[in-house]
Amino acid sequence: TDILLLDDDSFPMPNGVNIGSWLSLEDYFFVGKGHANEVATNDGTIAGRCLPPLHTGPLSNSNNPMWYSETDLFTNLMRKNSVGYAISVFHEHRKTFFNFEKDLQLLSSLGIHKIRIPTSWCMTDDNPDDYFLNNNMTDDNKGLLEKFACQDPFFEDVLWPAVPRSMIINLLKSCAKYDIKATLDIHTYPGGTSPGTFSGVWPRWPRFWTHGDASSEKDIGRQLWKNIVHWLELLDDDILQGLQGITPMNEPGHLAGIFANGKIVNGNIIQKPY
């Protein structure tokens, strides 16, 4: 795509930009022209059509499912193809959607020095590239999922595709190189914090607020937050030069008013929130 750079210094430039749907998916980024305009359709409509470069849509391959959210897509890619293929689809998307060198250099040249990175809570110390190179993606499914997925503690049948921590580290290094500061936004949590595609478990009803207990060992949210902060604190100073900060949650209770009584299909409530 050709990028038009304007010479007029008076052209308003934002202080920062959001790198959405890179490490935390939202379906309306991947619907094609005119197929979605809401973050949570209340009539049961499924909107997500692809996740390039490997998943190019159901019309090109009947084993490429449409999807509501990233856990929905991950599960159906495994069911229709294989665990290795599902991991590959997410990893290739993450590797190609955002270019650390070209994109950050361009942002810096435009005078934009702050970026926000919505990311999944589910992270891994393993890198799928190591397994692709060694042809280990045919390993047993259990071993692959232990390395590249997280079991949702609120849903027995929900697995999250893990974000390699090395990818975030490399991002922060590149940000420091181009004088850019990144804010990491923990965009999702186990169980889902809100109705809608961004919470990651849609069309399931979110359970984060209703099925945990702050006074018991089920206080998953606080412990997860502590673990992420602790990991960042251990990073080298040259890496942290690219970090602006970290936000603990995105839009808690988002759309709660619209979906106060559950999901609505054809005017009928089909699922109560609890």
Image (cartoon, grey):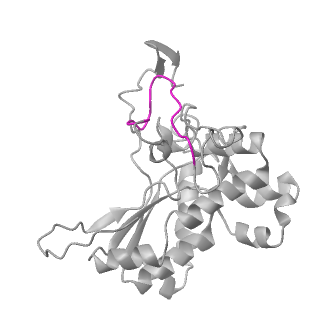
Quadrant where the C terminus is found in the figure: top right
Residue 217 vertical placement versus 90 (above, below): above
Quadrant where the N terminus is found in the figure: bottom left
Residue 212 placement (x, y as % from top left): 58, 40
Say left or right for 50 vs 265: right
Residue 85 vertical placement versus 232 (above, below): above
Which image quadrant for residue 145?
Answer: bottom right
In this orientation, does residue 223 appear?
yes
Residue 233 placement (x, y as % from top left): 52, 76
Q: Nearer the viewer, residue 227 or 165?
A: 165
Q: Which residues are magenta?
A: 35-50
Q: Is residue 125 magenta?
A: no
- Residue furthest to the right: 140
Say left or right for 15 vs 80: left
Which image quadrant for residue 162?
Answer: bottom right
- Residue at 63% x, 62% y: name it: 92
Q: Nearer the viewer, residue 221 or 175?
A: 175
Q: Nearer the viewer, residue 42 or 6?
A: 6
Say left or right for 74 vs 80: left
- Residue at 78% x, 73% y: name it: 133
- Residue at 21% x, 72% y: name it: 6
Q: Nearer the viewer, residue 50 or 144?
A: 50
Q: Most prominent secondary structure in the magenta stretch?
A: loop
Task: Report the number of discs.
Answer: 0
Residue 27 placement (x, y as % from top left): 50, 43
